[in-house]
Amino acid sequence: MTKREIERMVSLADERYIGELFEQKLHNKNRHISVWFVTAAAAVALTVFIGGMLSGDGSERLDDLQVITMETVLSDFEPVGDVFPEAVFKENIPVDYDENFDYSVYFNSDEFEQVNEDCDFTDDYFEFDETYLESIIPFDVSEFPNVYGSVCVDENNVPLNVRLDFVDSYDVKDDSKYMNIVVNSKCFLFTFKGLEPVQRMGVDIYGCDMTNKSEKKTLGAYFKSDGKYYTLYMVNMTYEEAIGVIDRLILSGFSADSFDLLKGTECRTESRAVTLAEANEIEPFAGYIPQLERIGDMEFSERSYTTFCKNGEMQYHEVLIEYCCMENYEIKRNINAYYRKYNVEEEDYNEEHAMPLVSLDELTRDKLDGLARFKIDGDMSFYRFYISIEDFEILVVANCTPDELWTYISEINECSKREQERSRQHLSLQSSKLLKYPVEGKISEPYGERTADGAEDFHNGIDFAVPEGTPVYAAADGVVQTSMNVGNGYEPLQPAL
Amino acid sequence: MEDSGIISLFFERSEEAICETKRKYGRFVLGMIMHILRNESDAEECENDTYMSVWSVIPPQRPMNFKAFLLKIARNQALKKYRFLNAEKRNPNVTVSLEELAECASDEGDGLRYGDNELAEIINGFLETLNDESRKVFMLRYWYFSSVNDIAERCGISRSKTESMLFRTRKKLKKYLEEKGVKQ
């Protein structure tokens, strides 16, 4: 076979192999806890997940964490030899669950179910019954408050590793800002089957597509300081912004004061307000946005991630919608709606479906009460319920009372009518970017370089030769901005475009 | 807009089709082309050629995977343009990729004796035998013309692993071609 044939041959590769090149996968599997940093002005999310113990003069609660020492753990946590004969106990290991596992289970010290309810991310992982979990976790987690853990297992339910995080959290609040910092005092990892965790030194940002550094994503960073490990999650940031955040942390020397720096961070990402047409370009939702018109004035930001479950990959796409542009509405509120789309079989998220679900059209004030679940988080109360639009499930989380929320929803419905009308107009204006010829006739002078009287010139238009009196039509939909007589008729309407 | 919607627009000969295509896939197409041409104005021109070419083949064609179809056309257009441009500003990624690939050639000369159908059958049969990772690396290198560094970063593997993977895959391809009893 000749060179040329081989070249030609490669270019004939099947479309399915081309398609798989552009599947975006976000390594974001070890999400134990998500924490929101929200400002009222913009749907800004900065998740801080700190692994390792904070040094410096932290609050009392931080000091308390030191009660859990390695000795305590070693004496109380006895790996069950029968279950895990090859178990290796490791201390303070940041883990990158990059590969070699099929799915994972998250649990905490209180109740397995509670994790299932309270933590958004864990719902779909929940595949085991409690007895099974007890049998694979080599100690009684209920003895340890504030333990969060995860188990990675392969397809035959053989555990690959167990990770434990001893965490405590506190809220930082200041007027409109809200940040919950999770302090992870210890992280332990049991590995099985000779699987070695990845040690990361220095700072390592992951989750970003280096070919597109300006893309906003959920990024994570691991770093080590004074023998302690830190994990920082940054939601919806570009690579550069994330670097900025980390620089600030490094400059501050990773003390508890670091968080003061983050509190007023300028590195946050502001969600941009979009029109429906623009929202339509947000990749996973392309084509679906028109169904969301009823949301009304809104700001979008977007996140997506991939997790793994028994039957393969599960992709979440979330659009964070904030609407705060309500006319005459003084208090701006955050209502975040998460849109999820799954590409797995239905039985994989039966748990999810156990939540009551109604469509927005059917939603009434009474039903809202039935759907709602209140969650108190510090002084902030979050109100959440699931609704559906076509095959999207929407989790609405809002920091307001049900009555207030209902007011918003009514406004949304009203707003959507207005918005629909407006977006229709907008879309029709946008509809044709290609200009049509304004007249039918012969082109006497095309666009481009030309020689006029021997001199080189660039012709910035197209000239049509038509008989006088030929009607000239607009080349595209538009709105007349100005129209004036410049002494030669209505100049802008001359056929020279 | 759904791909099927865009395709129907092409069938209706609506210029909207091109707008929609550009809106949805413009950055992928331009990305593909920029990869090969490395020059914005050439790339833009080439992007337009791509849409033009799509316009002229749909109908009658009705692609199953519109995105891949589009990228294929973009790739061909970009390569055509690339060959047309002078040799001095060659993009080493493309040149080197093509040279590497040429190692698998068993015949001298520059002839084309196989039909597209035969060639497609051979390459797809070969790709089928690879595992997901090496197939992706192979395609990124020889189809998408990525640099080894880019591939390593994208796939989260080391540079040397990428290189050796490519090397092994090329060897495999050569062997595969021999086994297939390629016409002498």
Image (spheres, rainbow, N blue to C red):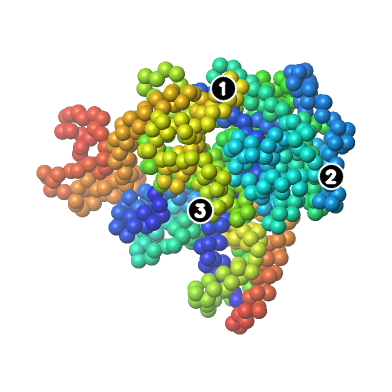
Tag 1, which secondary structure? strand
Q: Nearer the viewer, residue B140 or A330?
A: A330
Front of the two marks 3 and 1: 1
Q: Say which chain tag 2 marks.
A: A
Amino acid bearing label 2? Pro
Q: Which residue is the site of mark 2?
A: A79
Task: Measure how far apart labels 3 and 1 are at the Cα level.
Answer: 50 Å
Q: Nearer the viewer, residue B139 or A196?
A: A196
Q: Nearer the viewer, residue A94 or B97?
A: A94
Amino acid bearing label 3? Ile
Q: Position of residue B31 (x, y in %)?
A: 52, 50
Q: Which residue is the site of mark 1?
A: A380
Q: Are marks 2 and 1 on the same chain?
A: yes
User: In the rendered view of the protein, which quadrant contains the N terminus of chain A?
Assistant: bottom right
Tag 2, which secondary structure? loop
- Taking the image as shown, residue A183 lies to the left or right of residue A15, namely right
Q: Which residue is the site of mark 3?
A: B33
Q: Residue at x 60, y 25 (%)?
A: A377
Q: Say which chain tag 3 marks.
A: B
